[in-house]
Amino acid sequence: MNKNHYVILAFIITLLYWTLDAYKSASLYGSSLIDEFLLQTPHTLIFVKLLTAGLIFSLTLAPLFFNKRVQAKTKTPLNEFGELQRIADILFSSLSTKINVVKSLEILEEILHLEASLLFIYNKETLTLYNENEFIKAFFRSKEILPFRATSTRSDVEEFAVNCYLEKRATSELSMKIDKKQATLFAFALQENRSEKPFGNLMLVSHDPTFIEQNRALIEKLTQMLTFALSLAAKKELLQTLNNQYSSDTTSHFDKVLNIINFSKVQEHIDHEYKRHKRYHTALTLVLIDITMLKNLTKIFPAEVVMALKKDFIQLVKKNTREVDIFGKWTNDQFALLLPDVDFRAGQRVAQKLQVALDETKFARVGKISCSYGITSLSPKDTVGSFKARAESALVSASAKEGNAIEVKLQTTELNHNAF
């Protein structure tokens, strides 16, 4: 029975007493029932009746307060398997590891009635907070802590985190007062089986250490799950980095993952077209393309989703350009489109065509995207360096307009074209 039910029951019982007492007095003194009910008869003891009604109402609500005290002292034992399954469904979902871990910690705070949870990742000379909450904002000046730098301004919680980093214990505890209430900090190291040292630490802040001790087995299993998820994400990131390095190998001239030429091969084409321009006075236009907010997308979505976005984007560009046009990587997150035998006006038309195509396309998981376009054409007075630098300058100007913008820069004039 919830609080509202108790209040309704107390009101009904009190009203029943009031009505029965009025009926008894009306029968005894031969007065009107309404007068007795409204306490308008001379023999009515108003104070006594009000006091009695108040006592009856209060006594009816007594179980409500008693249950609250009992619940405060004895929390319901957790269903360990069910709670771990609930957390695992979130922790190993298809979203990015960062989002999954933070959501899992929020669920942990709920089921263990925690004041806060803190996740630290250990680096060579620093420890970094992985999540963020009000407790962290109150006790930490920065999300990155330098444990080997002596300072007298650290909070007790920061000192405890530093000691956990330095001592590398499997578990640690610290009692302290938070908002004038006694609390306990429990620290659990995140360590792979084959590793000699932990790579992180999970810290729990609780006002009920007994409840935490009762569920220590659940917490230890959760730390194993976190260890696996975080170490797997780190290995995937390392593999992706090595893959990008392999894909960007200047000796291969080809990105085997994205299936396009890389920067060194684009550079070869620019050198070839530059020599052709010098000899035959041919035209050449360079369009640099930057996907808006791509770095933010990499923080939100898994690496495979971002890679799929790049592949789909590359196919869209190839579909909307000529066979003689040369498309490749400029940097890891930027692309170059080399247009032989046309001037900057053709580059503008291609960029506008891509804007329309992107506006009509929804990419898997990501949805619609937009791009910034930096365009320039080769001038008789250009060097290869000045030609490329001007294209990059145009791209920077377009990107500053927060995406979906086209910027044209020529040697003697500058033409600005904002997307509709």
Image (cartoon, helix red, strand yellow):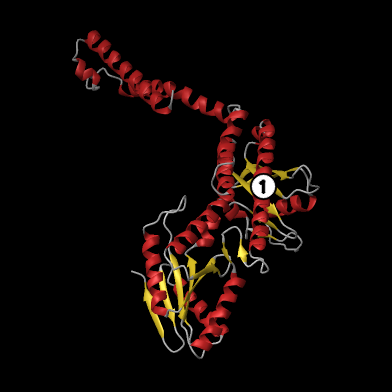
Q: Residue furthest bottom?
A: 381
Residue indicated by mark 1: 232
Answer above or below: position of 274 versus 10.
below
Image coordinates for residue 375, horizontal then vertical, percent? 45, 77
| Residue 281 can be seen, yes or no | yes
Secondary structure under badge 1?
helix
In the picture, the quarter occupied by the C terminus is bottom left
Give percent across and percent down for residue 328.
54, 67
Q: Position of residue 281 (x, y in %)?
A: 48, 87
Query: Residue 396, how many percent across, how many down?
Result: 49, 75
Q: Write the residue at 66% across / 32% down.
A: 215
Query: Outermost residue, right direction?
Result: 196
Q: Is 235 on the left or on the right of 295, as rendered?
A: right
**Relative to 274, is 109 above or below?**
above
Q: How crowded is the residue under tag 1: few (<14 C-alpha within 10 Å), some, or many (20+)? A: few
Total marks in image: 1
View extreme (top): residue: 28
- Viewport quadrant of the N terminus: top left
Left or right: residue 10 compared with residue 333 = left
Q: What residue type is disc 1 on?
A: Leu
Q: Nearer the viewer, residue 229 or 46?
A: 229
